Amino acid sequence: MKRRRRIDFLIYCIADFVMAMLSWACFFIYRKKVENAEISWSVLQEDQNFWLGIIIIPIGWLLLYALFDKYKDIYRMSRLATLARTFFLTFLGVFFLFFALILDDFVRDYRTYYNSFFTLFTLHFLLTSFVRMILLTRASRRLKSGLVTYSTIIIGSGQRAVDLYKDITSRKRSLGNHFLGFIQTNTIGEKPLSKQLVKLGELKDLERVIKERDVEEVIIAIENTEHSRVRAILNTLFDFDDKVLVKIIPDMYDILLGNVKMSHVYGAILIEVKQDLMPRWQQLVKRLIDLTASTIFMILLS
């Protein structure tokens, strides 16, 4: 299953590269027509700028997506959110290319700048978003049909865990969860979930279970009386932050305040718990500042 998801993500990246290449090639031809230059395949073959552009510029787009986009797993990506990010990143990338490469090109009047900017923006956005929507729609259908799943465990064994399990498994459209079992949180009292799923261990076994079972998603469904255990559970799960997606059932108080983030339109109401509050680009900028400042002060103090 993981291999299938990796292949689909690779196809997604290749599609982005090809669309960036195609949009720049179309824009290059458009600019030649604006300059009234001769356009033919033989001319393009001999133009080094053309070949450098369709190789280097798509690589730059991939780097931009890797920094600012959710470039990890297409089966966890929202089509609407992806479309909005594609629009924003296309504008950002075209804005940079305009001042870096296009500004000193041939111009007839000031309208040439506007036409060039919006032509490249339209070409790149339409081609990239069109192919992305096709791939994400295909991924969504595979996920809802149960062809792609994530190894999931439930932390909790009470009635809330049972209700959640029945809610997810009774839906016509799959949410992509393949339940391996549950982690017992309360050693005293009845364990209703044991009638539905196999017990994998207790809280002290959580780290071992995640490693041995190759768990990819954890849903915390503990009772209201067990809230004191949440901190210990999250401390263990945050060690697997890059590997495991953590979700928790919100209280009615959270729902009324609007703190609930819906991860699926047809899904159960769950909050995604993320340890990392800084986006990837902010982490990179912070790291660059740290290295630059450290280097400067080492030179000065030496």
Image: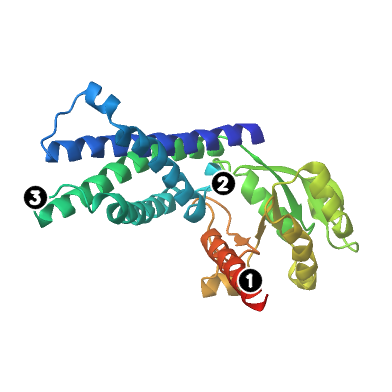
Residue 209 placement (x, y as % from top left): 83, 48
Say whether marks 2 and 3 touch (CB < 8 Å).
no
Mark before the other along the chain sequence, 2 or 3? 2
- Residue ID for mark 2: 72
Residue 81 higher or lower than 41, as above or below: below
Say whether marks 1 and 2 touch (CB < 8 Å).
no
Q: Residues within 10 Å of mark 3 (few under 14, many from 20)?
A: few
Residue 205 higher or lower than 254, as above or below: above
- Residue ID for mark 1: 294
Task: Name the amino acid type tagged 3.
Answer: Arg
Q: Quadrant of the C terminus?
A: bottom right
Q: Which mark is residue 108?
A: 3
What residue is drawn where x is 79% and y is 61%? 236
In front: label 2 or label 3: 3
Q: Nearer the viewer, residue 219 or 96?
A: 96
Which quadrant of the view contains residue 129? top left
Q: Is residue 106 visible?
A: yes
Asked whether, in this view, residue 161 is left or right of residue 282, the answer is right
Residue 98 placement (x, y as % from top left): 28, 53
Residue 243 placement (x, y as % from top left): 69, 50
